[in-house]
Every structure is written in C-alpha cells, then in structure tokens.
Amino acid sequence: MNEHTKKVNRKKFIIMLTALLSIVITVLSSSYVIFNELEEQLQQNLEDVATQNALALHNKIHSNYDLLLSLSNNMHGMTPDTIEETLASFEIFLEEYDLKRFAYCFMDGTSYSTDGGVAKLDYREFFQQGIRGKGSITGILTDALEEHHDLVNVMTIPIYDADGQVEGVFGLTYNSENFNDALQISSFNGQGYSCAINSDGQILVAMGNDVLQLSDNLFTDVLDADQRNHHAIADLQHLMETGSSGGGTFYLSEKNYYHCTPVKLMGGDAIWYMLTIIPANVLESRAAPVQNSLYLMACIVAVCILIGVTFVFLLSRDQKRMSLRYAYEDPLTKGANFAKFCVDMNRKRDTQGYIISMDITNFNNINIAAGISAGDRMIKDIWQILTDELQGDELASHVQEDVFSIFLHAENKALLIDRLKQISGRINKRARSSQIKGIHARCGIYEMKESEQLEDAYSKAQLAREQARMQGERHYVFYHEIDHERLQQDQQFEERFEEALAEEAFEVWYQPKYSASSGEVVGSEALVRWRDKDGSMIPPGRFIPLFEQNGMIAKLDEYMFRAVCRQQMQWLSQGQRIFPVSINLSRASLYYVDIVEKYRAIIQEYAINPDYIQLEITESALEGTSNIQELLEQFRDMGIRILMDDFGTGYSSLATLNMQCFDTLKLDKSLIDHIGDKNGETLLYYVISMGQKLGLHITAEGVENNTQLEFLKANHCDDIQGFLFAKPMPSTQFEQILSHS
Ligand code: C2E
Ligand code: MG
Ligand code: MG
C-alpha cells in the first residue's frame, strides 16, 4: 500500500469515526436533554401532587377543626357533672366525621371522653399547649384512653371562660389509619409516597408506597439511610424555616425525588409540611421508551452511515480501478501506455539497460493504402510481437500512433541490435503478409545509467530515433552516435527556412544531360543550392533529408518547380532555345494535398509547355503504396514526364521497372561506378536492355570518365549526366550552354 492510499484510508477512517462519534454525542446529549426535561416535568408533577395532597390534608383537618370550633361554643363552664352529657350530645358527629372520640380536659388534666373514658392527660403536649391557649394537632400517638392503644391523632383547642381565661382543653381524636386512608390520593400509579411531617421531621400522616418503610421520623430515616442525605435534610429544613415550597432528591434504598410544601392548619396554630416522594426509577421508566426509540434511531442512522460509507468506499474503489485503467491502459492495444511504462520503470530497482523509442518506417502507407483500421490492426500485432519478445522484467508501452517505448536488457550492443532486428523482422513479415512493403522498426536507443531520470533517458532515445529517420537502411541510432553539433545546425536550418524562401536564398542550379550518341545537350536537372549569408553554398545533401523529415520539403519543391517554370518561360521569351528540365520531387511532397492541382496551376500560370518540365522521383518513394502511382499518372496525363531517380540504390526491385508510371530510368551513380568490373557491367547491360524493352528512356547519372561513357554508349544508353560533361551550374552559366547549343 503506498503512502497516498494509506493517507486516503486514514482520512476515510477519521471521517467514519467522526460520524459515529457525532452520533454518540448527539444521542447522549439528546438523551440528557430529554432526561432533564422529563425530570423537570416529574418535579412539576411532584409539586402538583404535593400541592393537591396539601390541599386535601388541609381540607380534611380543617373540617375537623371547624367542627371542633363550632362544638366548642357549647363547652363553656363545663363541670365534671355536665361534661359527660355535653359530650354525649356530640356523639352523632363521630361517625359522620370518622372520629374516634371527643374529649374534654379540665385544667387539672382530668379528661372525659365520649367513649366514657376518664384519664389523667396532663402529661400530654397537646394539653400543655391547650392550657397555654394554643390549639394543636398531634402526630401519631398511642391511644391513652383505650386498652388497644390504637395509633391516633389528637386535635385540641383551648376553651375560654367569660374572662378570657383558659378553663379547659377540648379535643377530638381520630384513628390515624382511617384518617390516612381517607386522605389517600393516588399519585404516580401508587409508586409515589406522601406524608405530612412537622418541623422535627416527625411523620404525622403517611400515605402511599410502603416500600419506603419509613418509621415515625423522616429526618432520622433519611439521615440513617445514606451519607449524601445530610445536604438533602439541610435543604429541607431550610425550606421549612423559610416557609417556602421546593424540591430535591435524597437516597433511601435508591434515589428519590421529593417535593415539600407547607400546610398551615388550625388558623396558623400548627404548620405541617406535605412531602411527596417518588423513586427515581419512575422517571427512568418514563424516560425509557423515549430513550429506547432514540437509541434505536441512532442505531439505524449508524447502520445507514456504515452502509453509506461502505457503499461510497466500494464505489470509490471501483472508480479508482477504472481511473487507473484509463490512466494506464492504452485504448488500442489494451496494454500499457506510456504513463504505465514510466510508473513501472520508476518502480524498478535495476534500471540498467536500454531505453528504446521505436516507430515504424512508412507506417503512413498502411493507413493510406489499407485504411485506418488496418493500421490499428497492425499496431495491435506489433504490440503482440513486442510483448512476445520481452524477457524477465523488460517493459514496453504503446506511446502514440506508431511509436512504442521499450526497455530491454542486453549484454552488449551487438546482442541488442540482434534482438531489435528480430523484432523488426517479425514486424516486416507481418506487414508483407498484408502486401505492404517498406515496414521496419526504427529505433532510437539510449543506454540508461543507474539512477537516471526516465523522462530524460526517453527523450534522448526519442532524439536518436529522429536521427534514425536520416539513416537510410540502418534503422537504428544510438544516442551517443548523434552528432550534436550537426543537430544544432539542423535547428538553425529549420529556423532560417522561411526567411530563406522569402529572400530567394535557394538557387536553382542546372546540371546538363547529354545525348550519349551525339554528345549534344538534351536537357538538364534542376538541383537546389542554398546560398548562405556569407555567400557560401550549402549543398542539398545537408538540408534536404532534414526538410524531408520535418515536411518543409513540400514548400521547397514547389518553390523549385515554380522557379524552373519561370526560368524556362523567361528563356523562351528571350528567344533562347530550351530543353526539358527535370525537377526532383521528394516522397514527402507527394503526400502534400492537391499537389497535382497546384503544379498544374503553376504550369498554366507560366503558360509553359509540359514537355519542358519533368519530375524525378526516387524509387523508394513508391514503396508500399499504389496511391503514388496514381498521382504520377495524373502528372503524366498533364504531359509531364516522370523519371525514376537513383535506380539501383538500396533494395531496388526489378518489378518497379514494370510500373507503367515512368518514362525514364535514371541509373544511379553507384551502378555506373561498377563499370569496369565484369559483374557490374553484366548487371548494367541487362538493366539497360530490360528497361529499353519496356519502352523506358535510359539516363546514366554520375558519369565521370570516358570508360563509363564508352560502355554506356556501346550499350545504347540514351543520355549521360555527370561531371565528365558538366557539373551542376548556376542558371547564368547554363544559359551560355543553351545559347551555344
Ligand atoms: P540526385 O537527384 O540524384 O541528383 C544528382 C546528384 O548527383 C547531384 O548532387 C549532383 O550534383 C550529383 N552528381 C551528378 N553527377 C555527378 C558525378 O559525376 N559525380 C558525382 N560525384 N556527383 C554527381 P546534389 O546536387 O548534391 O544533390 C543531391 C541530392 O539532393 C539529389 O540527388 C536530390 O536527391 C536532392 N536534391 C537536389 N535538389 C533537390 C530539390 O530541389 N528537391 C528535392 N526534393 N531534392 C533535391
Ligand atoms: Mg535527381
Ligand atoms: Mg539521382
């Protein structure tokens, strides 16, 4: 896994973690908010219930108090003799108010009650308070007037005589249990607990949940239950002192919420505090459904995110694969492209070997002659051949059009060339099977040093391949073989070309052709010369191959063609006798669009008789395509004769002799140079006679001596061109020859 992928994966992991973390935080915070809201709601409920209970307690106690007050009006001036009768008259209220008894205490503490009991109650707090002129209501007491010792509450008020002095204490007693039951208010489905306490924490009335198991003092119960409750009791006591209502929590067997509200009783003589308590699990059970659905939703969202992330991950992996394919696959060969080649090369540990930039000679012929799809098929087959030939960790890629990059190992240059020849041979064979000739692998080779940048190495191989274009039959060039000085000069030639054309720095020189039999001038060949700024001449061999390679030759050929036409017309108009002039036409010019039309227009422009204009085409220009022959036919239809130049160089094929598109065969100097040796002469003899039998006119080029001339004459060669008679010369000089002929 590379650094970039690791980084991307880390990023994805962080994004996913952040998403999940934010879900957890959202869930927790919303759960917290919900819980708080529910808690607030619960406390509000608690307060409502406490207030209701307080009201109910107040009403209940008040009804007893009112009864006590109203009955007390009949109690003035009671004596032990009258008390029993008076009390008996109150009995009817006992049942109605669910009371246990009424009782009256004289100032000595002797008490009489409706149930007939007489007892000494001067020890009781309520009696003490009563004689001090204060009403009271007790907490739960053990009934002193009865054997069963029921738990009871006693409500007492003082009775005043006419002077306003306390003369006795009148009270009623009710059964705590019945009272509590009567007060029972359903709160929180029975889970709540309510009790009334006094400021000492003594439980006066209790109702509801007995799970709390409280004894008779809430403060001691609560304080005993848990350390943390000290604060709670302090808070509660503070509420009591300030007479306000409020709530909080304390811990018994578990956490409980409470609300405390004061209840003023008996006209303010007694203050009780109504406490409603509820275990915290009520809140939890309320929050649970909301929280559960929240958790469920969070789980669904998390799962969705996980699915989403997985989906995006898979998608991006697919996209990455696809884009890698687009980035590294050559659409035509489905093999490696140059980018892949570079990546693979850069990954290599051992980069010692040969970097080769390879293209295919005359590849355009395939496209022109057999069509683009045949060209594409050829590229695929070449790719197949290349991959077949690779060994071990060697690499290749299809760069563009007919260009391939290759990395090969070889022990030495000779072995490398053997391998390249093998590749070229297979490619050539494949092309020949499609009737296409002149197809070879052309290679620029650079011996790569270790730790060298691939891009630099490949551009050197490319430069070498460019040079290979000018190498003729040798289809490979090593980078170190390149003449860099010459290369620089080439660049200058290219840069100066347009300017030279405009300034007419290209001159037409003429080399006369003579009749072999009569020795008279019969024509000439136009040869270009580039006059440099310093007056020196640059020979065509120096720049023609360069311009052929970069396509500039088409302009130069047209320039020469026009110059010759103009010159012929000028000589004619001067009354000069003129002869046909042959102009060299490069193969690259023949690919020029509308060349025939263009040349026809020039001939028409100068109104020159086409008999005086000829074209020289090298035999190699014909290789591999029939299209050129058609072009030549069109020139011939215009009346222009076509000369096959340089016949006998390279792999000349006798079959080209049979082509119908030529009028003249120009025997190359290399054939003429063989005059003197037997085999060469035999060959020439047959070539000349065969050419003549086919109706071709024969011109010998590069004739330098009389031996050659005599042989050519004897073998009926038609025309002679060579230094023996004349070298190429400027037009003014050639004009002299014309005027003497
Ligand atoms: P080519 O068309 O085969 O021209 C004949 C070449 O042989 C000329 O060289 C000429 O000077 C040289 N030559 C003729 N007789 C003799 C001889 O007896 N001995 C020796 N040693 N050489 C002889 P040049 O002028 O240097 O031209 C070289 C080539 O450049 C031409 O070969 C032709 O292929 C090309 N060329 C010249 N001018 C043009 C042009 O205007 N257009 C194109 N496309 N090619 C041209
Ligand atoms: Mg020529
Ligand atoms: Mg020639």
Image: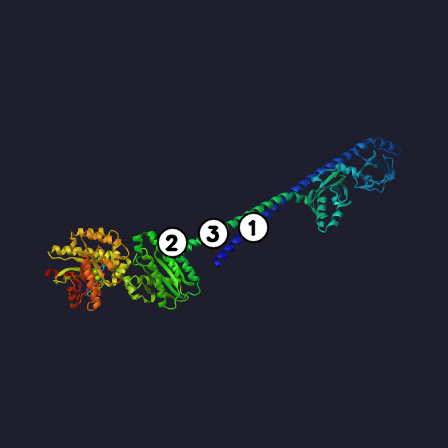
Per the model, the C-alpha gap separating discs 3 and 1 is 25 Å
- Residue behind mark 2: 332
View quadrant of ligand 3 = bottom left
Outermost residue to the right: 81
Per the model, the C-alpha gap separating discs 2 and 3 is 22 Å
Q: Residue at x 43, y 65 (%)?
A: 350
Three-letter amino acid code at disc 2?
Answer: Leu
Q: Residue 534, image x and y in percent? A: 21, 64
Q: Residue 288, image x and y in percent? A: 64, 44
- Residue behind mark 3: 318
* In-front residue for pair 498/1: 1
Q: Residue 575, image x and y in percent? A: 10, 56
Can the viewer see residue 457? Answer: yes
Q: Residue 76, image x and y in percent? A: 84, 33
Three-letter amino acid code at disc 3?
Answer: Asp
- Left or right: 7 in relation to 631: right
